Image: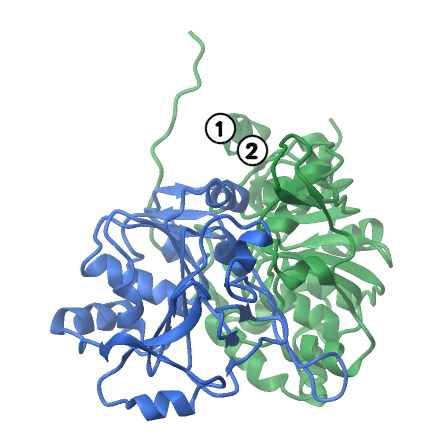
Chain colours: A green, B blue
Amino acid sequence: MISKVVTLQQAVAEHIHNGDSVVLGACLEPMIPFAVSYEIVRQHKTGLNIIAPISDISSDILIGAGAVNTITGAWVGNVSEGLGHNYRRAMEQNIPHPVTLVDHSNFSLGMALLAAAYGMPFAPNKSLLGSDILTSNPQFDVINNPLTDTEDPIVLIPPLTPDVAVLPVQRADRYGGTHFWGNTGLLQEAALASQKILVLTEEIVDSAVIRSDPNRVLFADFQVCAVVEVQAATHPSPMTGIWQRDTAFFGAYHQRTRTREGFLDWLHEWVLDLPDHAAYCRKLGQQLDDLRIQQQHLSVPVNFADQ
Amino acid sequence: MIIAAAREIHNNEVVFVGMRLPMVAYAVARLTHAPDAVGFFECGVMRHQPAQSLLYTMGDPANQKSAAWLTGTLQLMGMLQAGKVHAGFIGGAQIDRFGNINTSRIGKPGPGFTKLPGSGGAADIAAMSQRLFSIMKHQRRRFVERVDYVTSTGYLDGGDSRQQAGLHHGGTTAVITDLGILRPFGPNHELHLASWHPGITVAQIRQATGWDLQRLPDAEETNAPSKEELQALKKVDPQGFWS
């Protein structure tokens, strides 16, 4: 097999194009690939359709930076602080430019990805009945359940096939084999639905490590187009077993981005004026070191022997 | 408010726990009267024991360590849609007299309108839990005659309109606020005042409500928090970040 290892700059330049639909954060609050969000801003990508159920301030940063044309999601804001100021400015005042919202709930977005993942023409859903999400998103349709004679309305959710899913994992081999642990959110549906997967890994390991526990693999290695080794790719969101959440960082962002000028100032300091993610980590310094999970709470090994 | 919310969780129930204050209410319930309640968190966490340290989000490492099950959103939401969740707990920005909740926008798009973060999993939890509880601050601008956007369904236009829309179970059971508790009453399912918290008057609550709020016949003062409940809250949120 051929190594798929590239740098973060190469991966974003080669695999994320202007106008692409990109899954950036599939696990809701943890495991959000901020390193790619920042690199998208540094490479001045535009017109993206960001697919993310929640993704905390990652979506807010990309909107404020002008990279986003469409948000396909269920929630955009700052989870521990509340509202996202850039999202509000874009939706209320078209600053820096108008953004289209393809409104979903977490479940309906997951079902859209599920339909694409399994090649289904639609996924049937009940949870949007009566909600204005149903009427504000023209992609949905409602029919009566054709398998019953009684009145039983169901929502049809069309499949959603992202151009690329950016998925952080704890460890990967050079060929796209991955181990992920923690809550999975919509990760597996996003991975299986997408045209290709860009993997960010905290550590590159030998393929034997991946093969030692194939149950910890959530998607096929051949779907992976690039493997990027990058430390703390999910900061300020947590990475299960390795990095805690930097809640103070979210708080400071909330305060500093209340005005457009404040946001641009923040964006220069933390993204545009830094050459790469390693520089970002160096700038965090002790603040990042303090977030490294120190204790061990190891799972018990499982046996896959065949004789 | 958090303690009053925690009391709505019964022991042995499966509870779908929303973001922010519901996380705290669930943990308080677990530490007091509902030690065997099971918590579902939409990011894909199922827990028996509450997390051992304060949660800022449900995906924090503390909520994953010693979880009963780490899985996907669709597994838990699927069980919710299949009717296996007894109680759902969500927050909200705006609510109306039929318990419909808005977390999407205040006003209509145009000058003066406010964009809110959106549903997350709230719409799903509201539509499909057997019983729904919401927690929010009681203010006239939040408790309105009709929400600007139904993110999460209550009883829609009252009466049987929820059933007519195709939702055959569930609906708001209680709205817990910092002033008191509202519950639906009668065939119309309009929210009525069920109790007022110690030190709060009925007039104060009516003043903070944007419709002509009626009282339940047996409305009474909310029981004051017990020592045990206050200790549990202190344990869950020692610095008062959420409470």
Name the residue located 44 percent from the left edge and 59 percent from the top edge.
B58
Q: Nearest the camera: A7 or A11?
A: A11
- Left or right: residue A283 versus residue A65 is left
Tally of numbered discs: 2
- Furthest toward the front, the residue is B187
Name the residue located 19 percent from the left edge and 74 percent from the top edge.
B230
Q: Is residue A53 visible?
A: yes
* Quarter of image, res B30: bottom left
In front: mark 1 or mark 2? Answer: 2
Q: Do the residues labelled 1 and 2 touch (CB within 8 Å)?
A: yes
A75 vs A167: above or below:
below
Q: What residue type is labelled 2?
A: Val
For label 2, the residue is A217
Rendered location of residue A20, percent (x, y) = 83, 54
Q: Nearest the camera: A107 or A166?
A: A107
Rendered location of residue B52, percent (x, y) = 28, 59
Tell me the CA gap for discs 1 and 2: 8 Å
For label 1, the residue is A213
Q: Is mark 2 on a helix, strand or loop?
A: loop
- Furthest toward the left, the residue is B227
Q: How crowded is mark 1: few (under 14 residues within 10 Å), some or many (20 or more)?
A: some
- Left or right: residue B9 versus residue B146 is left
Q: Residues within 10 Å of mark 2 (few under 14, many from 20)?
A: some
Please give the chain letter of the residue carrying mark 1: A
* Quarter of image, res B191: bottom left
Same chain for labels 1 and 2? Say yes or no: yes
- Left or right: residue B39 versus residue B99 is left
Q: Is mark 1 on a helix, strand or loop?
A: loop
- Left or right: residue B38 versus residue A42 is left
Rendered location of residue B8, percent (x, y) = 29, 62
Q: Which amino acid does label 1 sit on?
A: Asp
